[in-house]
Structures are given as C-alpha cells and as structure tokens.
Amino acid sequence: MTPAVETKQPFFIGGDWVETGRTYSICLPYDGSQVAEVQQADAAAVDRAIEAARRAAPAMAAMSNADRSELLFRLHAFVARDGVEFANLIALETGKPIKEARFEVERALQTLLESALAARELHGEVIPMNAAPGAQDRMAITVREPVGVIAAITPFNVPFNLAMHKVGPALGSGNTVVHKPAAQTPLSALRFARAAHEAGLPAGAYNVVTGPGSEIGARLVEDPRVAMITFTGSVPTGKWIRASAGLKKVTLELGGNSALILEPDADLDLAVARAVTGAFMHSGQLCISVQRIFVHESIAAQFTGRFVEAARRLRIGHPLEETTDISSLISDQAAGRVKEWIDQAVRDGGRLLTGGGRKGNTIEPAIIADLPPGTPLSCQEAFGPVVAVDLYRDLDQAIDRANGTPFGLQSGIFTRDMQRAFEAARRLRVGGVLINDVPTFRADHMPYGGVKESGIGREGPRYAMEEMTDSKLICWRV
Ligand code: NAD
C-alpha cells in the first residue's frame, strides 16, 4: 500500500542536482517500509552549498521588494499546482495522516503568500532626530538590509510548512538559503527545490543538503560564511547551536509542553473538540501540542468524561487512509520513550483514563489524571499523544502551575469572562496566549515564538524578516 518515491534523489546546490554517491533510506514511520532513497551530503557538498549561497547573495540583495515578492508568488503557484504530490510526500516521510499532510500544504501555501506580501512591505523607519538636544539639525532614516547567507535547519514534525517559514521570509528579504531538513524527512524539501528551479529562482538562492544533523548541521553552524542560523527543533540542539554559532545571528524555535486552562464558565462543547485536536493531532508531535490541562474542579468530571469519550473515537490507521486520525510516532525510539513516560506516570500514581497502549510505533491517545508532580510528563516535553488532566480550585493556582515548567511557547484558556481571560493572559509566561482556543492554534502570519527554554526570536513572515535583516541608519545634516 505504501507507494515508493523516486530513488537515489539528489540534492540541490547552486541550481544543479548533486550526488555524492552515498545514499540512505527514508522509511514510512508507520510500518518501516522504504519509501525513498536520498543522497547523503558530505563536507564537500555542504561547502559547495554555502559557497553557492554566498555567490548568489549580492544578486538577491540587489533585487527590489517588488521582484522578490513576484518570485515568491511564482513559487506559491508552483507549489499550489503540485499540492497533491507535496501532501503525499509529507505523509510518507512523517507518517502523519494524509488529511493533516494536506492541511500542512495549505498552511505552507499561506506562508509563501504572506512572505510575498511581507516582501513588498519590508521597510525601515523615520527617526525623529529632533528629539535629542544637539541633533535638531539632522534627519535620519533606517533601511533594512539582508544579512546574507542563512542556514535554515528544520525538524521532522512539520517538515514543509516550517521550512517555508524560514525560506519564504529569507528570500523575501533578499537573503540566500542553505536548508538542512531533518534527516528523516527530506522529501518535501527536495521536491520544493524542483519548484524553486521551475519558478526561476536565481541559482544558489535556495540550496538543500540532506543528512544527519550532527555532521551536516554542525558544519553549517560553524562556517564563517553563514551570517545567520534559523533553527526549529529540540532544546538540546538549540542550546548547542547557540553556544557554537559565535557572533552569527540565531533564532531558535524550540520545544514546549503547553498548558490549557478551563474555567467554570468554559464552552465545554468547544473546549472538548479543540482539546482533542490540540492534544492528539499528529500524535502530539507538535511543539504547541496540549500536554497539560488544568480544569476547574466544578466542571472536571463533566469535561473529563467527554474528553475521554472523544479521544476513544479517534481512528488509528495507516497514514494514507482517508479516515485515519492517529498514525504513528516518527521512530521506534520515540514510541518507546513516550510509552515509558506513560508507564512511569502510572507507576508514580497517575490514573490512566484511556489509551496508552503501543503497537509498533503507534501509541493510543492517552489521558492521565492525578499526575504526580516531578514525573517527566508533568515538566518535560512529551512529543506524543498523551495529555495530563489536573484539577484546580482558583485561577491563580492554575496559572502558577501552567507557568511551572522550563518552557513558554503558547497557552490557552477557555472562559466567557474576558476580565479573567486577560488577567490570565497578562500573567502567563509564554510567547502567545489563546483565549477560547487551544495553544495549538497558529495562523501563519501571526508573530510566533517562545520565551524561557522555548526559544529566541519570532516567526511569521513579517517578523522573521525583521530577524533576517540588519537595520542600517542613514543620518544627514539639513
Ligand atoms: P532535533 O533538534 O533533533 O532536530 C532538528 C534539526 O536539527 C534537524 O534538522 C537535525 O538534523 C538538526 N540537528 C541535529 N543536531 C544538530 C547539530 N549538532 N547541529 C545542527 N543541526 C543539528 O529536533 P526534532 O526531533 O527534529 O524535532 C522535534 C523538536 O522540535 C521538538 O522539541 C519540538 O518541540 C521542536 N519544534 C519546535 C517548533 C517551534 O516552532 N517552536 C516547531 C516544531 C518543532
């Protein structure tokens, strides 16, 4: 049932398709069947990719806002034309259900569109020089200049849209890119290189090299020709990158264990439906997956009963089946770790309300009540289909517990009382608060990113372009 993709796929450097002769297999995480074989980059290939990007940088920097925007509209059109193919590749490389893969393609298209629009609008500002004593006879403006070569390092879980969140703004603001997708999920990136070629992107503006992060990624991080690293992935890799990048610009979109608070007046129909999506979409392998639910004691029994029922209705199956809601985790190792965390939570006294079984790399959606503090599930990132439900008596307590982790990506609160909602929004230590929604919601143009160990910097094309350009002041005496 698993269709094979082209074999020995080359990567893309300086507008050419490049092979090293060394290949590795890409397998469907659901059943381990091989779906493709791709070339593995070596040190020489990474060097060539960086050099191609460096050479292309002046031409990209010299393009007008209008021309870069036009380029992104063309890219958008080519990806839209082949959207079905992109969705299939995403489902095969990640093992996510096909309906979620289609959604990812829609989101990636939106990201490209927003990048095309933001490229037109990129501008500096007028500085009111007459605000300072002695500077009244001067005027000043700032202009935004591209940083040059950007290394984009992306994770396995949302391989295409998260890549577009880096590539779209980087090209739109006049930079060139060397992209390193996660070793397990390079297929959508390689397919995107074809779209870039067809769209007439200048040679060297987008390059993609595939292979293990420790070899390929590390070379990108350390090379002095790279001006900026835009990274999405785990906290340990992010910390290593920050420590190794020297004076390069770095943005880090890292992990989370998002909290959802349900107040007594929450719209329960909506909260249950959104919590199921938020906790179990892509088997919980989303940085803003709902991992911790704090529900007011007055509605806890009602909410939990309905939430468990809804989780049990999710259909487990092959990622390419239209009806599948839950497929598999990315690897045997990931499934083993999540299963062990669930078992440990139960050994420590947590009550497993549903799910938690493992078959191959698939974990049944699990809901755990009375989770003891200090278990990995309560404070680390699960990155699996498991959610803890805990009761609280007053909102202060819920906010303190929501804040009581090293992470701070997004949080959600359901209440009809806007006063309380805004009080919570003010006190939650996160990059974004969603009122009457789960923290898993993201629209691609909104500013997105974390505080604490969840990262540094913001994405969303307009905000990413700010990060990917330097401000230059031009001041003149009048
Ligand atoms: P990961 O850190 O293992 O890998 C991410 C990327 O870094 C991959 O391309 C990998 O090959 C590369 N890499 C690994 N070691 C490297 C090194 N030494 N130098 C340079 N690159 C290296 O993460 P993952 O398992 O692919 O993704 C899951 C993580 O990503 C989770 O923690 C999740 O929360 C996080 N994530 C965050 C966001 C966000 O927007 N904040 C979005 C999606 C995923």
Image (cartoon, helix red, strand yellow):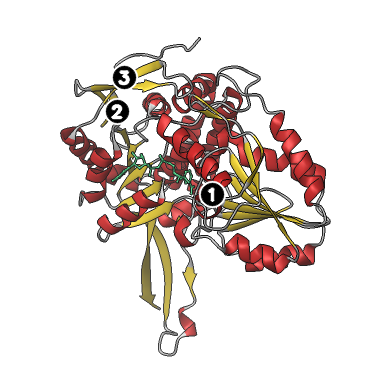
Using the numbered discs, state the Cα–Cα distance from disc 1 to disc 2 in whole angstroms.
40 Å
Determine if residue 202 is in view: yes
The answer to whether marks 3 and 1 mark residues whose Cβ atoms lie closer than 8 Å is no
Determine if residue 457 is in view: no
> Is 54 located above or below residue 206 in the figure?
below
Toward the viewer: 473 or 310? Answer: 310
In this figure, which residue is indicated by the disc labeled 2? 12
Q: Disc 1 on helix, strand or loop?
A: helix
What residue is drawn where x is 53% and y is 41%?
A: 343
Toward the viewer: 285 or 309? Answer: 309
Residue 164 in percent (x, y) is at 46, 38
What residue is drawn where x is 61% and y is 25%?
A: 99
Query: Are there few (<14), some (14-19), or many (20+) residues within 10 Å of tag 2?
Result: many
In this figure, which residue is indicated by the disc labeled 3? 9
Amino acid, disc 1: Leu
Q: As drawn, is 14 to the left or to the right of 345? A: left
Q: Give the mark nearest the N terminus, 3 or 1.
A: 3
Query: Are there few (<14), some (14-19), or many (20+) residues within 10 Å of tag 3?
Result: many
Amino acid, disc 3: Gln
Q: Quadrant of ligand 1?
A: top left
Amino acid, disc 2: Phe
In this figure, which residue is indicated by the disc labeled 1? 377
Toward the viewer: 416 or 31? Answer: 31
Q: Decide if ligand 1 comes within 8 Å of the CB at mark 3.
A: no
On residue 290, which mark appears? none
Residue 397 in which image quadrant: bottom right
Residue 130 in percent (x, y) is at 48, 83
Residue 53 in percent (x, y) is at 26, 40
Using the numbered discs, state the Cα–Cα distance from disc 2 to disc 3 in whole angstroms.
10 Å
Assign the C terminus to one quadrant of the image: bottom left
Front label number (3 vs 1):
1
